[in-house]
Image: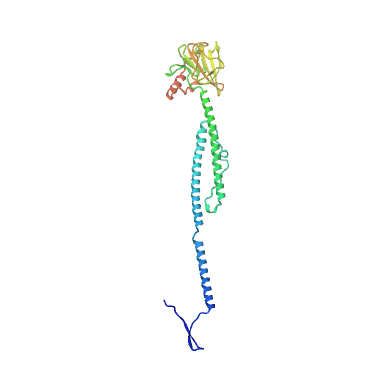
């Protein structure tokens, strides 16, 4: 494209002369162009910074988004752990401790330091604050887990004690009596075989052949092993602890001695008819806290429900005792 030349009419010389732009005008125009360019560039940069994120901002935003997702997942994990721990605490209080008649742990002991509510608006919470909340929740869970472990340790001790106690509670018949045919006289007022008058019979009479083995009905220590001519004849008294004692009378021969430890099911003597007795039998008594109680309720280890009901009816029959 050809360059356009400009001319003007000079009235002084009466001639057309070539138009030459003054240097000052050129400078002003150049300065104006530079100024406009600079302002435009600044506006574009400002708009870019205002609406377009920088690479570092993009990285920070992505990192913050990941932290929010991780924090949400962590909070869900805490909620799951809390639910499971509460279930264990509830079972501990309402099932395990009730079985062993132990008091539930109070909330003040179990919960300990309570965690503050966790932040839900991450954008407006400082990182240190969020971390402190997580630490608080972790501390609370650790405390509750520690108390639950201590509670289970206590339950283990109760289980051991309960097993020992159950082994020391009279729970079997003193002579073999699977068909329930050996019950001769029950607990309560019965006709005295000698005086023929009603008299309180404080035990159960098991009629059996001479020499039939007699068994200890629970673990314990032989408290007495002697002969009573006017009463029980050759007899044994075992102290089982926990307020329980048992008496076995009219033996033909005693096997154990005073102070000896015996186990449930161990032979302690043999059926006889010594002392005040009208025939071979084992007179058996259960003493609980110094009071003689009906032994028929202490055969739960070797009787089914139907057998127990039959035995209760047999023992309740009004008849004459053997002693």
Residue 105 image-quadrant placement: top right
51 vs 120: above or below: below
> Which residue does the image show at 51% across and 35% down from the upper left?
92
Q: Quadrant of the N terminus?
A: bottom left
Marks counted in the figure total 0
- Colour pattern of the rendering: rainbow
> Which residue does the image show at 50% across and 46% down from the upper left?
74
Q: Give how far across and how far down residue 196 sits, in percent.
A: 50, 12
Q: Give how far across and how far down residue 50 sits, in percent.
A: 51, 62
Front residue of this view, candidates 26 and 130 = 26
Asked if residue 232 can be seen in this view, the reply is no
Q: Give how far across and how far down residue 52 sits, in percent.
A: 49, 60
Q: Give how far across and how far down residue 44 sits, in percent.
A: 50, 65
- 183 sits to left or right of 229: left
Front residue of this view, candidates 221 and 175 = 221
Front residue of this view, candidates 243 and 188 = 243
Asked if residue 236 can be seen in this view, the reply is yes
């Amino acid at each position: 494209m050809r360059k356009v030349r400009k001319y003007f009419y000079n009235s002084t010389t009466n001639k057309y002369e070539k138009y030459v732009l003054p240097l000052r005008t050129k400078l002003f125009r150049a300065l104006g162009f530079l100024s406009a360019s600079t302002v435009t560039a600044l506006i574009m940069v400002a708009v870019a910074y205002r609406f377009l994120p920088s690479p570092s901002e993009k990285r920070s935003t992505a990192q913050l988004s990941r932290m929010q997702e991780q924090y949400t997942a962590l909070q869900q994990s805490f909620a799951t752990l809390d639910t499971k721990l509460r279930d264990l605490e509830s079972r501990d209080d309402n099932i395990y401790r009730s079985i062993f008649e132990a008091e539930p742990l109070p909330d003040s002991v179990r919960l300990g330091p309570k965690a503050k509510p966790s932040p839900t608006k991450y954008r407006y919470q400082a990182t240190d604050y969020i971390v402190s909340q997580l630490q608080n929740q972790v501390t609370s869970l650790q405390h509750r887990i520690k108390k639950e472990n201590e509670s289970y340790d206590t339950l283990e001790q109760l289980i051991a004690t309960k097993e020992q106690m159950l082994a020391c509670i009279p729970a079997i018949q003193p002579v073999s009596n699977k068909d329930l045919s050996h019950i001769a006289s029950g607990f309560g007022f019965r006709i005295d075989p000698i005086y023929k008058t009603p008299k309180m019979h404080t035990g159960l009479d098991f009629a059996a052949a001479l020499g039939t083995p007699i068994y200890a009905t629970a673990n314990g220590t032989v408290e007495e092993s002697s002969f009573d001519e006017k009463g029980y004849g050759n007899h044994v008294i075992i102290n089982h602890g926990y307020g329980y004692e048992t008496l076995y009378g009219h033996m033909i021969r005693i096997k154990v001695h005073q102070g000896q430890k015996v186990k449930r099911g161990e032979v302690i003597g043999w059926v006889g008819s010594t002392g005040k007795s009208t025939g071979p039998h084992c007179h058996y008594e259960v003493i609980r806290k110094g009071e003689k109680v009906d032994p028929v309720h202490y055969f739960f280890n070797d009787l089914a429900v139907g057998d127990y009901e039959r035995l209760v009816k047999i023992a309740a029959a009004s008849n004459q005792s053997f002693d």
